Amino acid sequence: MTRPTLPQNGAQWPALHHDLMASRANEIQWDQGAFYYHWPEPGGNVHQAAMAAANMFYTDIWLGRFNQPSINGFAEELEGFVLDLHEAPEGGAVTLTSGGTESILLAMKAARDRARTLGITSVRPTIIAPWSAHAAFNKAADYFDLEIIRVPVGEDLRADVGAMAEAITRDTIALIGSAPSWPYGLIDPIPEIAALAQKNGLWCHVDACVGGFLIPFYRELGHDLTPMNLAVPGVTSISADLHKFGFTPQGISSVSFCDEETAGHAGFSFDAWPCGRYAGQTIQGTKAGQTAAAAWTTMRLLGRDGYLDLARRLSRTTNRLVEGATAAGLRPLAKPEAGILTLTSDDVDIFAVSEALNRMGFPHCAVLNPEALHYVINPVENDVPIDALLEAMAGAVTDAKASRVNRAGKQATYA
């Protein structure tokens, strides 16, 4: 393949606009991909307003606190929103990041550096996580020279606290729980994990990148869900993506800490160069100011009432999909709790069903162990995408049972 080179002459906008539109010709369409992981869509005019706000701050930078007053104001309000929803104690702190992976990396960097101050000088400190924890924890271990020990989950597919306890050694610095886990959509027993961490003087991180802006509203609506926020004794930090069920445009997450001192371990500071002190709380240096403006606009436009309404719609959509999938011959791998639905079958090869759905143009993620289809729920405004997916599922099950389609091998991926 010939490597692209920058053209000598600039193009005209009409030609570029045509190319931009043409580039999307083969992309996944909303009515077929609404429950794939690419589509956080609140409906109404929310995204249009966020885009308008982003355009107003298109050229602004976001670099720590060295910004225009407007960007600092957006960031400070967003930080307050996050701490409020996660019931942070007085003195809690939050850092806004580019995504869930960065949030997890910062939490693990902070856990490592705090351990150093406590005299833990292991060559490779260890973090203990359930098998279902996000792969970003392994990335953090790789980046920060940590060892990660993954322990099996229980029969209920949640973290096995007993197994985590048995894995603790003198080198352990942190325990991990998910709310919910990406593979199964289930909330781990966070109070028990946090109590175990507290008993052993360890850091407890809750990965709520998926559920951090949904679970608080589900609980407010009466859903019986495990407590998972900073109000839980022993929880040290929590990661939560605004661009998932916070419904902001892509590119913003958060990592919250129980206090300012703890948060300080995530930061970086250096002054041995010609320009003096260089310090920051994120891995990124300069970020786009439009990200803060768009996120602030989204959250202000929705407010608590808007998020509660979206939570109601998400719950309704989940129930419709479960009922329809069951009628088609599938079943939930586990009762969905917080925005993720996994489907399997006792009567048909689920990856043959997967292959049939892919051929029909209905993309989805997959879980390898146990084998299941994986969907992220959207609070759709009408039933068109629900009906389309359920019709496709029924046809896919029929084709798989009749051996008109077989599994073509399956490699679950998440990138």
Image: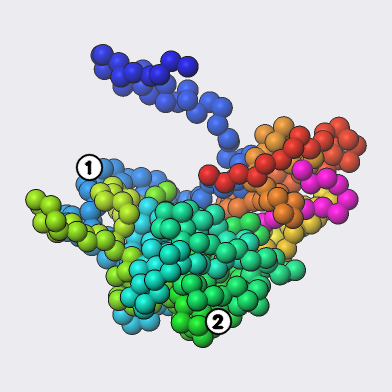
Task: Please state which amino acid type lies under the numbered disc 2.
Answer: Leu
Magenta span has 349?
A: yes
Q: Secondary structure at mark 1?
A: loop
What's the residue at 86%, 47% (across, down)?
348
Q: Are marks 1 and 2 in contact (CB under 8 Å)?
A: no
In the rendered image, residue 35, in percent from the top left (x then y), is placed at 61, 48
Task: Nearest to the eye among marks 1 and 2: give it.
Answer: 2
Residue 62 on the magenta span:
no
The image quadrant of residue 334 is: bottom right
Residue 114 as seen in the image, left or right of residue 394: left
User: Which residues are drawn in magenta?
Assistant: 341-351
Q: Residue furthest right?
A: 402
Location of residue 166 (image quadrant): bottom right
The structure residue drawn at horizontal position 33% and vertical position 75%, both measured from the top left corner, is: 117
Q: Nearer the viewer, residue 398 or 55?
A: 398
Numbered circle sitting on residue 196: 2
Per the rendering, the mark at residue 59 is 1
* Residue lying farthest to the left in this orientation: 274
Would residue 299 be seen by someone viewing this image from the given angle? no
Residue 286 relative to residue 220: left or right: left
Q: Position of residue 342 (x, y in %)?
A: 70, 55
Q: Residue 337 — which label?
A: none
User: From mark 1 to mark 2, how far is it between C-alphas?
Assistant: 47 Å
Q: How is the image coloured?
A: rainbow
